[in-house]
Image: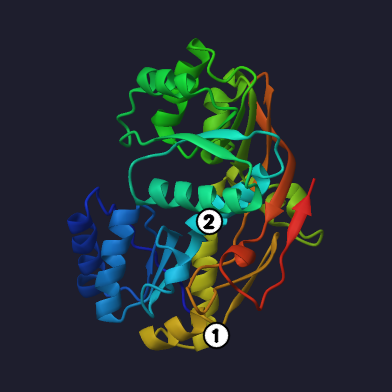
Amino acid sequence: MGRPVEVISRDYGDTPQQGILVAQELIEREHVDVLAGTILANITNAIANYTGNKKFPMVSLWNTMPASEGKQNDYMFSVMSTESQAMAAADFAAKLKAKKWATIAPNFAYGRLLVQLFKDRLKKLRPDVEFVGEHWPTVSKIDALSEVSVLAHSEPDAIFSSLFSSDLSGFVRAGNRRNLFDGKTIVALEAGQKAYTRVIGKELKGTWYAAGDPSENAKDPASTFFADYRKQFGSDPEMYTNAGYLVYQFIFAAIEKAGSTDPDKIAKALEQVEVNTPMGPLHMNPQNHRSNFGIWLGRLQPTSDGADLVDWEYKDASQYLEDSNTAKTTLSH
């Protein structure tokens, strides 16, 4: 609308109560037009309940509520969703030879829903698959050696993991010490991001599959996104960097379509806009307010300074969000 954009950033803390207080400050004192961000499930859901009651638009990075339950409210939208990760991973895992699976995931909403969706879909696709154990360490408090010992005792062919941060690196190193991964298949969603491959990539044993960062090979040939990003930041975009960028692209597109910063008009426009990206057009599903931003899944190939994601596929999320209006998109490399 010919006006400059000002971003006012706040740390929403580590509790739902803190998150709501920050949202209140931004809306009532700073008079912002839209809220952008949030990723932790309990805080996102608390703020979404508050903004829904206020009839105030919010675009989050991640949504952990089941998409089958529909939208949380008319004003809450999300770029990434648990379904697009878990169900795409199950489709990928169904092609692997492994039959005995164990799972390990953080003990909160994201981990619980992710594992349930993965198990349900994999069993549907591969009735011969058996799950021999579930493990639920507390976030940032994993007893890695103990988890590895119990996992080894169940003798799985494959392990499905959604561990992240220090929990993931601790698990990899403890598993290496006990030879847990030797000869096994591991599907570890978070492990393919550069933030982790730089730390643990060259240490990986066994055969690891993961979700990775955006791949230049998936771009529209006419797109200069990757070159422009490198020129400005000196590196390639990572998964959450790219998702954060898309949060703002959706907001800008909605304001332009609405021709206004009126909350109701922005929320309605978010159901209708389409954002052009190197992965193709992205949109919000009007039934559940999740975007069709997908996931790069492939094999991790250790290198001298990390690991590369190879033999990847890009899975558009539409097929997992019950969106009958958008065709399935799969790119292979």
Say which label, 2 or 1, has the lower sequence index: 2
Which-is-in-front pick, marks 2 and 1?
Answer: 2
Residue ID at (58%, 18%):
203
Residue carrying label 1 = 257
Q: In which quarter of the image is residue 17?
A: bottom left
Q: What residue type is labelled 1?
A: Lys
Q: Position of residue 254 (x, y in %)?
A: 51, 79
Residue ID at (59%, 63%):
320
Residue carrying label 2 = 243
Residue ID at (39%, 24%):
147
Q: How far apart are marks 2 and 1 (CA)?
A: 21 Å
Placement of the C terminus among the 4 image quadrants: top right
Crowding around mark 2 (Cα neighbors within 10 Å: few <14, some 14 to 19, many 20+) is: many
Q: Where is residue 8 in the image (x, y as percent from the top left)?
A: 34, 62
Residue ID at (25%, 65%):
23
Q: Which amino acid does label 2 sit on?
A: Ala
Give the SS element for disc 1. helix
State left or right for residue 141 relative to residue 278. left
The answer to whether any part of residue 145 appears in the image is: yes
Q: Position of residue 62 (x, y in %)?
A: 44, 58
In the image, residue 142 above or below residue 71 = above
**Relative depth, front residue between 222 and 194:** 194
Q: Which residue is situated farthest in the front direction here? A: 128
**Relative depth, front residue between 155 and 5:** 155
